[in-house]
Image (tube, rainbow, N blue to C red):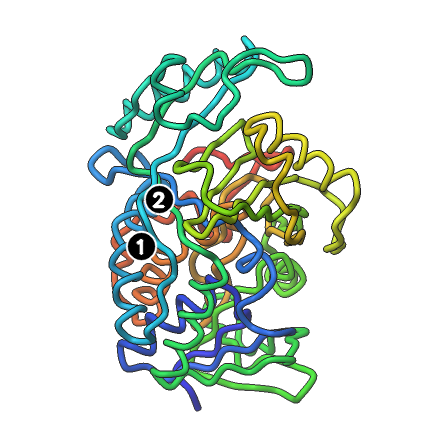
Amino acid sequence: MNDCLIIGGGVIGLSLAYELARGGQSVTVIDRGPPAREASWAGAGILPPANASAAQNGYEQLAALSCEMHPRWAADLREATGIDNGYRCCGGIYLARSRAEADVLAQQAAAWRKRKIACEQLDAASLARYEPALRTAESADAAPILAAYRLGDEAQLRNPRHLHALLAACQRFGVDVRAGVECTALETRGDRVTGKVTGVITNVGTLSAETYCVASGAWTGGLLRPFGIRVAVKPIRGQIVLFRTPAPILRHVVNDGLRYLVPRDDGRLLAGSTEEDVGFDPRNTAAGVQGLIELATSLAPSLANATVERTWAGLRPATSDGLPLIGRMPGVTNAFCAAGHFRSGLQLSPATAVVLARLIRGEDPQIDLAQMRLDRPTHADGEPIDG
């Protein structure tokens, strides 16, 4: 019997398996489809900066720990597997193209500074120096850029490479990764105080371990429902367009509200992302792709001549109150959950893995998980209740 069975082979599940296995535990990961796919693979790999010294709650502590860990994990994974996950500190530029957006961005800049995140306000000349390919003047088909800020410590990595490296590292450390194994329910015994999970029911039979962790992304909700968890998890589709140019036209991640352009060193550039509440529908749509192409060309006109190399979509797991579910499952002593990270799964994956590994080993998580616990109280509208 393995020490831990992890349900879900995305970035959260593989990160936890990697952390546990290199600490000497025996781990099995099961996934309903191919591991290292779904939302984890489909994202853009943006890593916003964070500062541990100014973190005011558990979520900010988690973000700050991940920010510290990403460069270390990138180096460790490269040493273990030979795979470069594309981590680099490229900086990020945040734009506003209306007066209302400029007011919101100014408030965000004040919040960054309060959290001790280096933030530089850019005028038109400095923005043009940093990113000459951006359209800074008003034109007939695009609003002008009215405000811009630069976060020099924003980073990125390449999701497929990172997932490939995690999968290879897990296999090197002896993790048993099984594709095409779908969990439909968790078996339990005992009462609501001392109960235990005794196995997971799958399409290949019942599998058992000493401990269990549900990390199945947008598919987590059905497994949690029997445990009385009130925070719902549902899929939100995000579409992405991949451009290819002969050479990079941008250096920074460019953020326009919730949408972005992410340049890669080889001339590829991601434009994303939509947010669509359409259930478990992973299709690209003409409207979604067209909107992203219009976003990209309105910001960087030269992309009108770029090759559209590929489009795809991912189903990101969103919770009803906007915070992930991280911690022990209520009513059982040997099962845990890490899900509902929405747009921040890859960003928060290293710290989530470390915190969960500590909990599974019976150690102090060293981060306050009260905001993210599975049995947290919520208002009717889904917002968490303070305290």
Residue at mark 1 to residue at mark 2: CA–CA distance: 9 Å
Residue occupied by mark 1: 70
- Examine the rendered structure and indicate whether residue 357 appears above or below residue 269: below
For the residue marked with disc 1, what is the amino acid?
His
325 and 273: which is toward the camera: 273
Please give the name of the residue rendered at 25% of the width and 49% of the height, measured from the top-left corner: 68
Name the residue located 45 percent from the left edge and 51 percent from the top edge.
373
Which quadrant is home to the N terminus?
bottom left
Mark 1 or mark 2: whose residue is earlier in sequence: 1
Q: Left or right of 345: which side holds 275? A: right
Q: Residue furthest right?
A: 286
Mark 1 surroundings: few (<14), some (14-19) or many (≥20) residues within 10 A: many
Outermost residue on the top side: it is 99
Decide: is 207 above or below 321.
Answer: below
Residue 172, quarter of the rendered image:
bottom left
Amino acid at pointer 2? Ala
Residue topped by disc 2: 155
Q: Is residue 202 above or below residue 140?
A: below
- Does 167 sit left or right of 279 as displayed? left
- Tell me which residue sits at (59%, 28%) in the image: 301
Label 2 near label 1: C-beta < 8 Å? yes
Vertical position of residue 66 compared to residue 320: above or below:
below
Callout 2: few (<14), some (14-19), or many (20+) C-alpha neighbours within 10 Å? many
